Image (cartoon, rainbow, N blue to C red):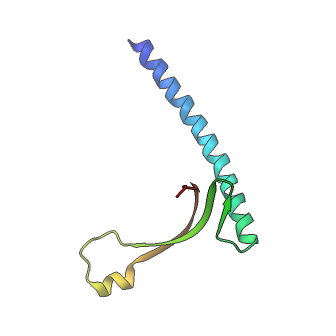
Amino acid sequence: MEHEIYNTVQTFENNKSIIKKLEKENEILKNSIKDYMKNRNIFTFRLRDKTITIKTIHKSFVNQGNLPRDIWERYATITEYETLNIKKKTSK
């Protein structure tokens, strides 16, 4: 029984390592795509069967709920980040 779980744990750790490596590679690829688009001042384009879009998202939050509006506006943190979306084209 212990041998079975050991193999499962080993497989889990190996997969985790592979995922981490792939995520790092994908981050480099994603930045390359975003740089390509920004250098050409484009935010959406189509490529064969895909649509690629860069969006800037704004997110604001505070950690404590039910705050009065004036306190919310004074202390809320606004975070801005970009997303890169790649979707398959849908046929209509």
Residue 21, percent from left and from top: 64, 41
Q: Nearer the viewer, residue 43 or 13?
A: 43
Residue 12, percent from left and from top: 50, 29
- In percent of the image, x 46 and y 22: which residue is there? 8
> How many numbered discs, if any?
0
- Residue at the outermost bottom position: 70
Q: Nearer the viewer, residue 61 or 32?
A: 32
- Residue at the outermost front position: 92
- In percent of the image, x 52 and y 58: which residue is there? 92
Residue 46, percent from left and from top: 66, 62
| Direction from residue 69 to residue 59 in the image, left or right | right
Q: Is the N terminus in the top left, top right, bottom left or bottom right quadrant?
A: top left
Can you tell which quarter of the image residue 44 is in?
bottom right
Q: On screen, 82 above or below 2? A: below
Residue 80, percent from left and from top: 52, 72
Q: On screen, 81 above or below 74? A: above
- In percent of the image, x 58 and y 35: which residue is there? 17
Q: On screen, 2 above or below 32? A: above
- In percent of the image, x 56 and y 29: which residue is there? 14
| Direction from residue 58 to residue 40 in the image, left or right | right
Q: Nearer the viewer, residue 43 or 79?
A: 43
Q: Nearer the viewer, residue 84 or 22?
A: 84
- Residue at the outermost left position: 66
Can you tell which quarter of the image residue 73 is in?
bottom left
